[in-house]
Image (cartoon, grey):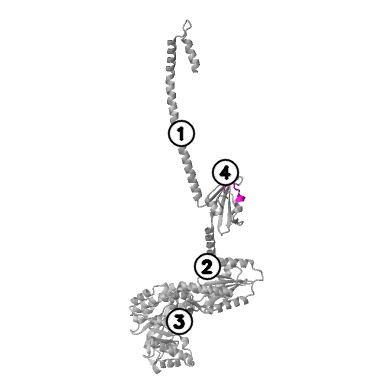
Amino acid sequence: MKAEALFWQQCTQAVTDDGSIDAQRLMDLVIATYRVHESNYDEIERSVETLLRENDVLRGNISALSQAFDGQKKLFEIILNNLPLGLSVFDADQRLTLSNTRFRQLFDLTEEDVTAGATIADLTAKMHGTENATAEPGRRTGRHSSASARSSRLRRREWLMDDGRVIQSMVTILSDGSNISIHADITEDRRAAERIAYLAHHDPLTGLPNRIHFREQVDATLTERRPDQQIALVHLNLDRFKSINNTMGVSAGDKILQQVTERIRASAGSENTLARLGSDEFAILQAGKQQPWNVTALAERIRRELSEPFLHGEKQVELSVSMGIAIAPDDGEETDILLKNAGVALSHAKADGRKRERFFASEMEAQMQLRHALEADLRASMENEEFELHYQPLYDLSQRRICGFEALIRWNHPVRGRVPPMDFIPLAEEVGLIVDIGRWVRRACNDAAQWPEGIKVAVNVSAIQFSSSDLTRDVAEALAAAALSPSRLELEITESVLMENLNEVLPILHALKERGIRISMDDFGTGYSSLSYLSSFPFDKIKIDKSFVNDIVDNKEAHAIMHAIILLGDALGMRVTVEGVETAAQLALLECEECDEIQGYHISPPRPAREVADLLSLPPKNGGMMRLPEAKR
């Protein structure tokens, strides 16, 4: 009730009968009314005070929220502008609503360029680059995504900047037509990916296509071959290249390989495909040429180029190459067959003495099958112990007596019969069985232990035994088992042993020599560096190859060479043994030259171990030579 109405009501109540106002009563009524509302006023005051306090708190909260919002806004701006990726947001009208610093940096834009409301067309016009039209097109999200996800699309765009950078943009288009884009500089990633792809198909040392890439090129060439077109595939292998790595080091070998590559590349020309298949293996694909004339000319060019010495510092290195050639379609119309047949032809080129090329022929396949059969028999023979040792005498010319025997392994196959060493020893070396065969040194030591004390035994050692077995231990165990003095054992090595890995072989030879074992260089004079190897190691003996003996009676030059080698051995304090002595005239000449030892059929062919005692017991004959029973010749 309003105060005026309440007061008039109280006045009415205070009127007396005579119409006058009873002031005391009016006062009482006013006071009573006041007292009734006094408690309400207190409550109102308290409420007002509460509201005021809450208002102050609310104002404080609002201020705090405002400050927090400002902080969050600043934090958002810091994060946004320090992201490693560019960010841009465009509305449904394709106008810019938000972007960060990295976005501007990636596309070389200024702050004025990226003001709110700028269109995509405006920004694109100011970019220093163009969009890559070959980039992968956008794709929709998964087939089973939600309705909201299906309403958006993900697109990839790529930009090639004028400074060479590649910028990739991942654009998410929302259902209302607006979009959010993330931008990244993928230049280094792209280069790394391209490098990986390159290395997957190329040889890193020479830059040539590798085996994988070469196969792809052969596949494509054979697929596109015209009916009247012949395609030649040349498989090249450097002869004995491993010895260069072993003697000069891998780094030097790599540099020489690079020189080899450049020479083959120049010989092959840009119209042919050159690839590196392995460490010292190359291949050339020649298409669109008349064959076999053109590939023959190509092979001759390569051989001529590689025959020139290679330089490493002040050193000259000589190389040779073996080549196998297969021609499609006659030698195969599929990549695997053509590669295999070229490889078969290469194997025959190397087996025929290296330094040559061989064209594939159908009979080669049959020969390879025979070779595989021989290899299988050879492996079985190791288990069946089909080998035996024969011994050929070493004859001391000054003492006119047998001073020792060379142990020569023989293979008696139950079906093949006697297999010549020249047929199975190279194969055993190639397939790694020579190590097991070489361990027949134990049998040789056991046999020698039954001979008179002054008779020695000589055993051939393969290059592979130095790298694929513990030769020092094998020899020590063989001597110990036979109780044979080390001075009675002579190990014969060829120059190829030193060529394979001089640094690895020399310590082993020194260790063997320190044990009292004699070391001999076999086939002296047949290699390129025999004299240099004589200075690398103090051999006890050099054995002159029989190829020098054949003409010494009738050929003055051959006689002079023999004379010089015998003098060299004497000057170096090394005994000299001449192999292949087959006539009395050869023997007489070597006696005049004061040669130390001879070996050959004129003395005796290799004999089984059981005949050694008979050989040792035979008396000398005319001029000090021994007489062999005719039945045993």
Marked residue nearer the N-terminal end (3 or 1): 1
- Give above or below for 370 relative to 182: below
Secondary structure under the numbered disc 2 in the rendered image: loop
- Give above or below for 239 relative to 200: below
Q: Residues within 10 Å of mark 3 (few under 14, many from 20)?
A: some
Label 1, label 4: how far apart the Cα atoms are: 39 Å
Residue type pointed to by label 1: Leu
* Badge 1 vs badge 4, beta-carbon distance below 8 Å: no
Q: Residues within 10 Å of mark 4 (few under 14, many from 20)?
A: few
Quadrant of the snapshot with the C terminus? bottom left
* Badge 3 vs badge 1, beta-carbon distance below 8 Å: no
Q: Does 436 appear in magenta?
A: no
Pick the front one: 504 or 369: 504
In the rendering, at what x and y percent does residue 346 appear? 54, 75
Q: Nearer the viewer, mark 3 or mark 1?
A: 1
Q: Nearer the viewer, mark 1 or mark 4?
A: 1
Residue topped by disc 2? 203
Marked residue nearer the N-terminal end (3 or 4): 4
Q: Nearer the viewer, mark 1 or mark 2?
A: 1
Q: Is residue 623 visible?
A: yes
Which mark identifies residue 529?
A: 3
Which mark identifies residue 58?
A: 1
Pick the front one: 540 or 205: 205
Residue topped by disc 4? 148
